Image (cartoon, grey):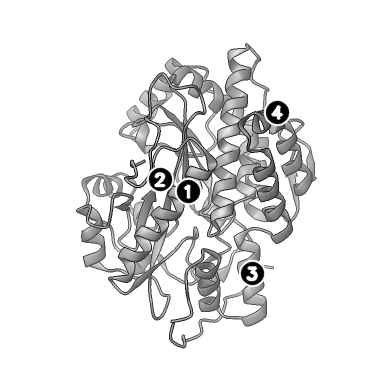
Amino acid sequence: MTTPTTSEPAELREDAPVGETVGVEEEHHVVDRRTLALRDDPQLNSAALRGRLGDSVSAEIATTQLEIATGVCTSLAQLRADLGRAREQVRDAALLHDALLLPASTHPFARWDEQRLTLRPRYLDLVQRWGLLALQQVICGCHVHVGVPSLDVAVAVSDRVRPYLPVLLALTGSSPFHEGSDTGYDSYRTQWFARWPITGAPEELGDAAGFHRVVEQLRAAGVVEDASHLYWDVRPSLRYPTLEFRVADVCPRLDDAVLHAALCRSLVRVLAARALAGEPVAPVRPEVLRAARWRAARHGVQDTLLDPRTGTPVPAAQAVRALLAELREDLEEAGELAEVTALAEQVLADGTSATRQREVVLRTGDLVEVARSVLADAGQDTSGLVELLAVPAGRHPL
């Protein structure tokens, strides 16, 4: 996370209360302003590497991606304003290079071989370690950092939040298309990324010592250099005193991104209090958790989800409202209940970005129109685009 110059962020103090602070990082696809195809622009990538695109923008593993970050925020209003500013900053910078930024987890018709690796030592090391997997990351993610000063508490929350991760994922799906085909998933990013053995929900870790022990074992196995190479759905951050949620797709709508961050932060506050009160971790089979994650990625909020408390299938709307009920007291105390409830009901009514992208294909049969609709969903002006060459959608798997 970066510190914004246009607001007064709270410092990320190691003695701050659990859940006092929150920040968001988003990865966006760079696309050509005229065709909306994936854009590999060496000048734009070089400018990002040298920090010339603004304090909120940085380069990513692929030359066709950029990452933005908010500052350290203490309220949802501040987070909304800061994320909006970061999106505007990267949008303005990209326009100078005749490009736009597509805030979704997959580009609807791009191929992975249309991008190149960003020449940074960390990414070169990933290629050495992972081979082709590191070159095929034509996916983008959203990461939420919630302030947790103690590593022991961060691990305790991580252990307890695992059953809730599928519900968080279901509310954010924005990757239904991959290389021109409808995958049948709301979040195909989740499935594409699952090829790495260091993704998904971690097993119960116990405490800080348990976390360090697992990291050391994975380092010895040759799959990570340190904890920053863990791509789990939730992990203690190596750089900040935070718990980092990495489960979500990138949400084109600012409202949906704020909702996701708010739910992550409230869960941290509630589950940390339970841990500090001595409540045990509720047992959950890893097989069931993987199934719940898969179902959330497959259907989003259009079908059933597993109730995190009982592990039984329930309608998605029921699972979301049960989560809100569980967080109600905390959200009320924070003055966030009305806003978070309204945002969640909005997703249940409108569907996720994946739902809206499919509606565009059903109406037009054109994946370029899908890309245009994502830009419009994010509040980007698409009125100045020239007439675009249509890209027909590939086969649906069903």
Q: Which element carries disc 1, helix, strand or loop?
A: strand
Q: Quadrant of the C terminus?
A: bottom right
Taking the image as shown, residue 265 lies to the left or right of residue 31, namely: right
Determine the CA span between mark 2 and mark 1: 12 Å
Q: Earlier in the sequence, mark 1 or mark 3?
A: 1
Whole-percent x and y of residue 287? 65, 36
Q: Earlier in the sequence, mark 2 or mark 1?
A: 2
Determine the CA span between mark 4 and mark 2: 27 Å
Q: Is residue 194 visible?
A: no
Q: Which element carries disc 4, helix, strand or loop?
A: helix
Q: Amino acid at mark 1?
A: Cys
Read off the residue under disc 3: 358
Taking the image as shown, residue 271 lies to the left or right of residue 97, namely: right
Relative vertical location of residue 380 with respect to residue 320 in this rendering, above or below: below
Q: Residues within 10 Å of mark 3 (few under 14, many from 20)?
A: some
Whole-percent x and y of residue 394? 57, 76
Q: Is residue 94 visible?
A: yes
Q: Which element carries disc 2, helix, strand or loop?
A: loop
Read off the residue under disc 2: 70
Residue drawn at (53%, 67%), measured in percent from left and top? 374
Q: Residue 32: which quarter of the image?
A: bottom left
Q: Residue 321: which quarter of the image?
A: top right
Read off the residue under disc 4: 329
Residue drawn at (68%, 38%), measured in percent from left and top? 337
Read off the residue under disc 1: 142
Tell me whether circle 2 and circle 1 mark residues in contact (CB < 8 Å): no
Q: Nearer the viewer, residue 63 or 25?
A: 25
